[in-house]
Amino acid sequence: MGKRKRESAELIKQAKKQVSFAKLKNVPSSPRKMRLVADMIRGVEVNRALGLLKFSNKEAAAKVEKLLRSAIANWEQKNERKAEEGELVVSKIFVDCAPMLKRLRPAPQGRGYRIRKRSNHVTLFVDTITTNAKTEA
């Protein structure tokens, strides 16, 4: 690895140490369904987001709620203190496609229809409200 690339990698590593995030991989639901839940809590204060997820009737909401609690715990671990009321916000959340399982369903006249069982990866970033306001301004 060259010097410039190594320095760039070190800068990226330092930036990641400042940010608290959590990842959920290979969730067996389609990315489209998960994005509906992700859009619901993007940019929302953490306690309000937990309330939205708890009372949502979508199956994906329970998984994202668990992921959000993990991200909060990661933030508390990095900052060595408990998160206060109204301090944290969901700064970024995105859903990516994961590998697809391809299956065949029997169809008339000896044919087979393809079934694509989709899955996704969710990444959720948590940040303080003051830091988030500085980056947006």
Image (cartoon, rainbow, N blue to C red):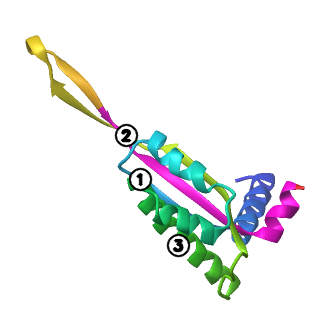
Q: Which residues are magenta?
A: 116-136
Tag 1: Cα neighbours inside 10 Å, few (<14), some, or many (≥20)?
some
Residue named by callout 2:
118
Amino acid type at circle 1 is Lys
Residue 68: image location, x then y, percent: 54, 67
Amino acid type at circle 2 is Arg
Q: Is residue 21 visible?
A: no
Answer above or below: position of 14 versus 95: below
Q: Where on the picture, by quarter, is residue 48?
A: bottom right
Answer above or below: position of 50 versus 2: below
Please tell me whether mark 1 or mark 3 is closer to you in this view: 1
Residue 4: image location, x then y, percent: 81, 53
Secondary structure, mark 3, is helix
| Separation of marks 1 and 3 at Cα, in angstroms | 18 Å
Dot 3 or dot 2: first in sequence order is 3
Given residues 5 and 107, the one toward you in this image is 107
Tag 2: Cα neighbours inside 10 Å, few (<14), some, or many (≥20)?
some
Secondary structure, mark 2, is loop
Please tell me whether mark 3 or mark 2 is closer to you in this view: 3
Answer above or below: position of 55 versus 102: below
Given residues 106 and 37, the one toward you in this image is 37
Q: Is residue 45 visible?
A: yes
Residue 69 is tagged as 3
| Separation of marks 3 and 2 at Cα, in angstroms | 25 Å
Dot 2 or dot 1: first in sequence order is 1
Residue 47: image location, x then y, percent: 61, 72
Residue named by callout 1:
58
Q: Residue at x 38, y 54 (%)?
A: 59
